[in-house]
Amino acid sequence: MHSDAKRDRSALDDYSRTVTGVAAKVSPSVVRIEAAGRPQTGRGTAHDQAIGSGSGFVVTPDGFILTNSHVVADAKRIAVSLLDGRQLQAQLVGDDPDSDLAVVRIYDSGLPAVGFGDSSRLVVGQIAIAIGNPYGLDCTVSAGVISALGRSLRTKSGRLVDDVVQTDAALNPGNSGGPLCDANGAVIGVNTAAIMPAQGICFAIAANSAVFVMGKLIHEGRIRRSYLGIAGQTVPLHRRVVRFHELETETGVFVTSVATGSPADRAGVRPGDLLVAYGNQTLAGVDDLHRVLTEDKAGVESHLTVVRATEKLSLLVRPVMRAS
């Protein structure tokens, strides 16, 4: 009995050390973001009106910060509060409502920046630690596990974001835009939503998707996409399927739905299909498909390789430019 209690206490101590270690490592990079805009009426126009607050985190030492699009949407003024108490004005670098991600910048140097993990290697049940500023309470830490992978989440723009990470690490208003971290303190997701009033159902944009969008926003200020018209998720492929069709990947994109009249619909893509290549580009998952569907692909006919039941098909598809 004594040895069992000792083992339980040791395990709890290990868990506590993991969470406190991640909090100490990542918290200096987490910021509070306050967005303000001009009032719609003529009264009080001399002052900005608060329109929201949330979280973000420093991704480069010279002040680029990743957050949610809905945190800074329509803001005329953005203020960033650092853990050391300083408050700096920020400028919007780029905004992508389709992925609910945005980049803002403060002008400083030597800031503590986070590191990113590989979200394609996440497994259900692993530790997940969220850090943010819920209800304005600075640097609040909550811990849980990865509850599910491959979820879809509809953003305010109406677009379905695929491959979203579900966690039971508690998120509340103000957590939006903060980091979801693994046990090593690497960012594995950007916290974006919680289902209210449900408990323990919270979502984060997967790190690999966030890194791709972030790079585009920093360098170009926006991200333009071509459009196929499918919703999908990353799934493992059966080894027999991989060997029989001599595929170059052991994972692919499982099509969960196809929009009526879309390029994918016209090409003959069906729900239940597995997408494994686009042109000469292997599709190991949804992130690969997002990378392929850049603006230069719009109007260009390409071969989409599909596994359907026991067949491998090559469908001709012509993406269109997404409406802004």
Image: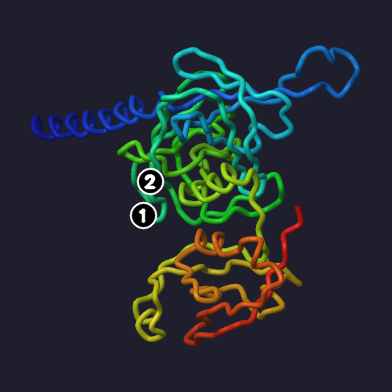
Asked whether the beta carbons under mark 1 and mark 2 sit within 8 Å of each other, the answer is yes
Q: Residues within 10 Å of mark 2 (few under 14, many from 20)?
A: many
Q: Secondary structure at mark 1?
A: helix
Q: Which of the 4 image quadrants contains residue 114? A: top left
Residue that label 1 marks: 121
Taking 204 as reference, is 74 left or right?
Answer: right
Taking 305 as reference, is 49 left or right?
Answer: right
Residue that label 2 marks: 117
Of residues 211 and 14, which is closer to you in this image?
A: 211
User: x, y percentage for residue 85?
Assistant: 49, 12
Q: Residues within 10 Å of mark 1 (few under 14, many from 20)?
A: few
Taking 12 as reference, is 35 left or right?
Answer: right
- Look at the image and tell me in which quarter the N terminus lies: top left
Q: How many marks?
A: 2
Identify the residue at image location x=44%, y=38%: 180
Is residue 105 placed above or below 260 in the rendered structure? above
Q: Which of the 4 image quadrants contains residue 76? A: top right
- Which amino acid, by three-letter code, is at mark 1? Arg
Identify the residue at image location x=58%, y=66%: 256
* Mark number displayed over residue 219: none
User: x, y percentage for residue 62?
Assistant: 48, 29
User: x, y percentage for residue 70?
Assistant: 66, 36
- Which amino acid, by three-letter code, is at mark 2? Gly
